[in-house]
Amino acid sequence: MRFQRYSAIALRSDEVRDVCIVGGGLAGLSTAHLLMTSGTGNIVVIEKNNLLGGLLRSEKIDGYTFDSGGSHIIFSKNKELLAMLLRFLEGNYFTHRRNTKIFYKGIFVKYPFENGLHDLPPEERYECLRDMILTYIRRVKGELSPPTNFEEWIRYVFGDAIAEKYLIPYNRKIWKTDLKEITLEWVGGRVPNPPVEDVMKAAVGLSVEGYTHQLVFHYPQKGGIYSLIEGILNRTEGLAERVVLGEEVLQIVKKGEILEVSTDARTYRCRAVVFTAPLKKSGRALRGILGDNAVLLNELKSIPVAVVGLGIKGKCLPYHWVYFPDNAHIFHRAAIISNFSPLNAPQGSSSVIAEISFPNEELLDATSDNYLIEKTVEGIRTICPSMRDVEVAKVWRWRDAYIVYDEKRRKVLDSVMPELRDSGVFPHGRFGGWDYLNMDMVFERSLKLVKEVLTYLNESAV
């Protein structure tokens, strides 16, 4: 969907809006949709970039479609929530049973690793099963102290063999952080936690599945993952006219009962703000609300990521995505998104996106596109052995991709969140709420948040 850069409705500055939404990614747009369909249409969505979608962007180049914000699929434990998300696509989606692997010592091991033990050589299979059973026995007998950080949790649940062969190397590669510095807040629902019986079955060759709420997933037939964003706009009458692109929010202050949201172009007046922009980089914008506490936001940590898209002449392996815990491959994950939808690549070709994380933005900026593309092409032959040529290659850089859960995160959020909400500023989403959320979780939080915002509006009107 194309927008006029400046919509007459969005830019009206002579009125007080009910809600100003900062950020036009999934969190912001789903909130806008829910507000408008609940009868609260006096809103504006302010997006810094000239494109909506946040990480859910897609780009078509010479017949190849790439999801430029990394690999995203639609799934949920909550069937009602899943149905809501799929309605935005209006039938424009495929349904898949996950076919995902881990590339380990030259072997494609079924994902999750503990459910693919039978793919390992017998000696390694034995080591993994032995350690997991012994760890389970010690845990049940109370001989193990409860874990206090992510690395301890991995060993506590899986035993040393699975931890050292796959889980610790992979997570070090993606997080670029000492796993002992990562807390356990994010683990539930994000890291598979298998019954020991399933691991025993897997080791002897019985088929078992882990991380089952992701086992069946959905993906747009055409348009890439951005089709979900377009669907929200298309199914929300009047929303497109309430979106402003290319304006960065510089300051939010409260004057009486009104919040003034100042961008690099104008000032919007509203009764409440839903804030989905990266909290870590919003100290200046939120200083008018937080005062000296705004400096705390600098202590939040995220992992930047480069996404490399390759349009490949030739068919790749039939997998959906593959994890790479080794250091020989520069990327930690590669998705063959032409296996998500054949319309993502010309016939006989493949569209692949690879994700490379960095310890900091400085290294992300210092690493050239040519180097990233060269190393990705070099490694991608593992999953595209029939590659005849690379017809398209492009790099997208994301300064905030993965939220790091360290000790500082909780302290910072506990300090700033109550103050923001009390002022009518509601942080939301992966980056606004500084919470590692999947798409379904973002939408679920939007449902809850809209109720909270409407309650706030009603109470502040009294």
Image (tube, rainbow, N blue to C red):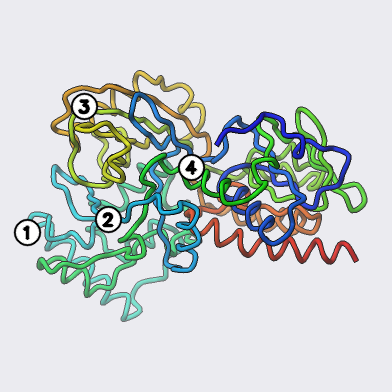
**Label ID, residue 243:** none
**Label ID, residue 56:** 4
Q: Earlier in the sequence, mark 3 or mark 4?
A: 4
Q: Mark 2 points at which residue?
A: 98
Give neighbour class at mark 2: few <14, some 14-19, many 20+ (Cα, 10 Å): some
Of 387 and 80, nearer the camera is 80
Q: Mark 1 points at which residue?
A: 122
The quarter of the picture where residue 374 lies is top left
Q: Which of marks 1 and 3 is in front?
A: 3
Looking at the image, is 380 positioned above or below residue 213? above
* Separation of marks 3 and 2 at Cα, in angstroms: 24 Å
Q: Is mark 1 on a helix, strand or loop?
A: helix
Residue type of the residue flagged with mark 3: Lys
Residue 359 x/y as whole percent: 45, 36
* Separation of marks 2 and 4 at Cα, in angstroms: 20 Å
Q: Which of marks 3 and 2 is nearer the N terminus?
A: 2
Looking at the image, is 315 positioned above or below residue 411? above
Q: Earlier in the sequence, mark 2 or mark 4?
A: 4
* Separation of marks 3 and 4 at Cα, in angstroms: 25 Å
